[in-house]
Image: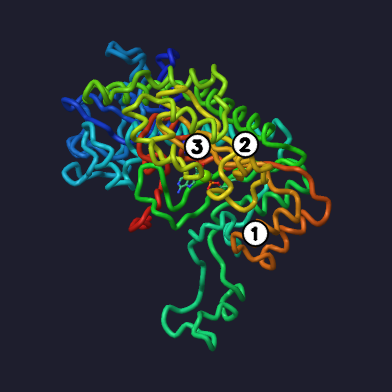
């Protein structure tokens, strides 16, 4: 099909030539002006209809949501905010749309409403912008690692291992719902199942990624991961995409540097390559802010926030140092933090993270050396501190407005330490024999992290609900299409 993309002509001054464009009708004003969008950009191309010479049959089918093909002359536009327009010579209706029934009316819809018609929300400017930025960020991730010589390793989606040891897995089975074979003790007999054992959707590609890193040196994964956890929040999905680099001969400091470099690189890529989309999203946020009470409005606009993140070093401190900061907060605030302050070893809640990132440092923060008890088995154990408290070489990167964006660690490369830790945490060594083999044969210090891709897209687009930055969100009671 011969046609030109609206993106390639909307800013053009190459006038007085014949063009054919195709797209969906956003609005049709006064039987004269069509705002046409083909998805290639957010802007609409104005089509000027020759009312007198266009059959009624066609005119009445130019409705919001209909798809049309237009051929005509590209001319300079006198209209405000547009350089050019097309004087239609022929208009063909490709697909009709009953304006009465089409859920997307030419007005501003709430994100909540658009979530209910998620199959059609792609046609709005907001989601056009969000998914273009998402695409750019994904591309930038691959470019970053490719430039550094990392190998993109495809780790499995179906796996037997529970990498995080948190038991939040979706089971994969072909066994019938009824009359499932049972063992003598009444348990499901997975020997009869497709894989001859129980299998799950992966929660993380890390353990398999470590196998790659311990041979190829530097790898990363970038794929879907699944968690059967409570994902009824604005920050959690049951299916999300994760970027997991793993580097041999690297320690926690290398790991922090890599993560900070990656984040700055991809944010800069989006700023440089998604100018129109980010301007639109920034404007959207500013408009939305105007309807909020003063206290809830954001201090900075989106672009300021993104640039600020590029220009400043992330703050790096340990879990224990973070607690000290919470202790020194104003009395009122401190009262709220009482439990954590008095219970070294407890996990940080979002109010603590928000205080550190949004109130105290006002920039991304890397917290390291968490208490061993609240972290996964594979993290490298530190020497106990003066008070005998055990910590691990963990790092979480916390972002303003987002909370945890990255979770990672230097890995426990010492076989005896790892085995001891697995026993303590009831993680069966025989099932992870393949993982332990990397420590038996040529073990080496190594480190890696997981970056939650949707949380990155949230930050860069300024959206507030994670369900609005993935095309097909999966959460409890939602897996229709
Ligand atoms: O902190 P997590 O659980 O770490 C891991 O899975 C490690 N195996 C990563 C590694 O070291 N290779 O998850 C990593 C990141 C989190 O920081 C968060 O950004 C994101 O993944 N994440 C989620 N994003 C959306 N929905 C969920 N349910 C998420 N759970 C984690
Ligand atoms: Mg984590």
The one of 367 and 240 positioned closer to us in this rendering: 367
Question: What is the spatial separation of the Cα atoms under label 3 and label 1, in whole angstroms?
Answer: 26 Å
Spot occupied by residue 11 in the image (x, y as percentages of width and height): 42, 17
- Residue at 35% over, 56% down: 476
Where residue 37 sits, quadrant-wise, is top left
Q: Contact (CB < 8 A) between labels 1 and 2? A: no
Q: Residue 154 location, x and y as percent?
A: 65, 51
At numbered mark 2, what does the secondary structure look like: helix, strand or loop?
A: helix
Q: Is residue 411 above or below residue 105?
A: below
Q: Is residue 379 left or right of residue 290?
A: right
Indicate yes or no: mark 3 CB to ligand 1 under 8 Å. yes
**What residue does disc 2 label?**
142
Mark 2 or 3 closer to N-term?
Answer: 2
Residue on which disc 3 sits: 405
10 Å neighbourhood of mark 2: few (<14), some, or many (≥20)? some
Q: Secondary structure at mark 3?
A: strand
Q: CA distance from mark 2 to mark 3?
A: 18 Å
Q: Quadrant of the C terminus?
A: bottom left
Residue at the image position 83 percent from the left and 55 percent from the top: 441
Residue 81 falls in which quadrant of the image? Answer: top left
């Amino acid at each position: 099909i011969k046609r030109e993309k609206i993106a390639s002509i909307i800013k053009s001054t190459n006038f007085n030539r014949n063009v054919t464009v195709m797209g969906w009708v956003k609005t049709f004003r006064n039987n004269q002006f069509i705002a046409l969008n083909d998805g290639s950009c957010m802007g609409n191309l104005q089509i000027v209809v020759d009312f007198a010479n266009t059959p009624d049959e066609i005119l009445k089918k130019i409705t919001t949501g209909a798809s049309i093909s237009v051929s005509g002359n590209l001319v300079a536009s006198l209209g405000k905010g547009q350089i050019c327009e097309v004087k239609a010579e022929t208009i063909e209706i490709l697909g009709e749309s009953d304006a009465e029934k089409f859920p997307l009316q030419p007005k501003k819809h709430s994100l909540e409403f658009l979530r209910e018609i998620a199959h059609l929300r792609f046609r709005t400017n907001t989601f056009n912008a969000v998914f273009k930025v998402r695409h750019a960020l994904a591309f930038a991730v691959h470019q970053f690692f490719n430039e550094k010589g990392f190998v993109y390793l495809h780790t499995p989606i179906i796996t037997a291992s529970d990498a995080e040891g948190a038991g939040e897995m979706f089971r994969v089975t072909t066994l019938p719902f009824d009359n499932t074979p049972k063992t003598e003790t009444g348990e499901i007999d997975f020997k009869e199942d497709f894989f001859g054992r129980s299998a799950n959707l992966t929660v993380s590609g890390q353990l398999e990624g470590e196998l790659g890193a311990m041979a190829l040196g530097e790898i990363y994964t970038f794929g879907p991961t699944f968690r059967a956890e409570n994902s009824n929040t604005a920050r959690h999905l049951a299916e999300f995409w994760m970027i997991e680099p793993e580097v041999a001969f690297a320690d926690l400091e290398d790991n922090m540097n890599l993560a900070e470099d990656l984040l700055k690189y991809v944010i800069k890529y989006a700023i440089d390559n998604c100018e129109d989309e980010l301007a639109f999203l920034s404007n959207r946020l500013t408009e939305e802010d105007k309807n909020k009470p003063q206290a809830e409005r954001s201090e900075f606009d989106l672009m300021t926030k993104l640039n600020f993140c590029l220009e400043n070093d992330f703050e790096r401190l340990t879990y224990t140092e973070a607690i000290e900061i919470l202790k020194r907060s104003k009395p009122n605030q401190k009262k709220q933090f009482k439990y954590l302050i008095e219970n070294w070893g407890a996990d940080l809640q979002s109010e603590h993270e928000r205080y550190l990132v949004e109130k105290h440092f006002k920039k991304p923060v890397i917290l390291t050396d968490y208490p061993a008890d609240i972290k996964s088995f594979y993290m490298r154990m530190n020497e106990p501190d003066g008070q005998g408290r055990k910590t691990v070489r963990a790092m979480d990167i916390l972002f303003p407005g987002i909370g945890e964006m990255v979770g990672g660690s230097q890995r426990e490369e010492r076989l005896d330490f790892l085995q001891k830790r697995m026993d303590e945490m009831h993680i069966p060594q025989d099932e992870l024999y393949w993982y332990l083999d990397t420590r038996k044969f040529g073990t080496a210090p190594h480190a890696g992290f997981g970056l939650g891709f949707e949380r990155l897209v949230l930050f860069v687009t300024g959206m507030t609900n994670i369900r609005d930055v993935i095309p097909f969100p999966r959460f409890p009671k939602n897996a229709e299409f």
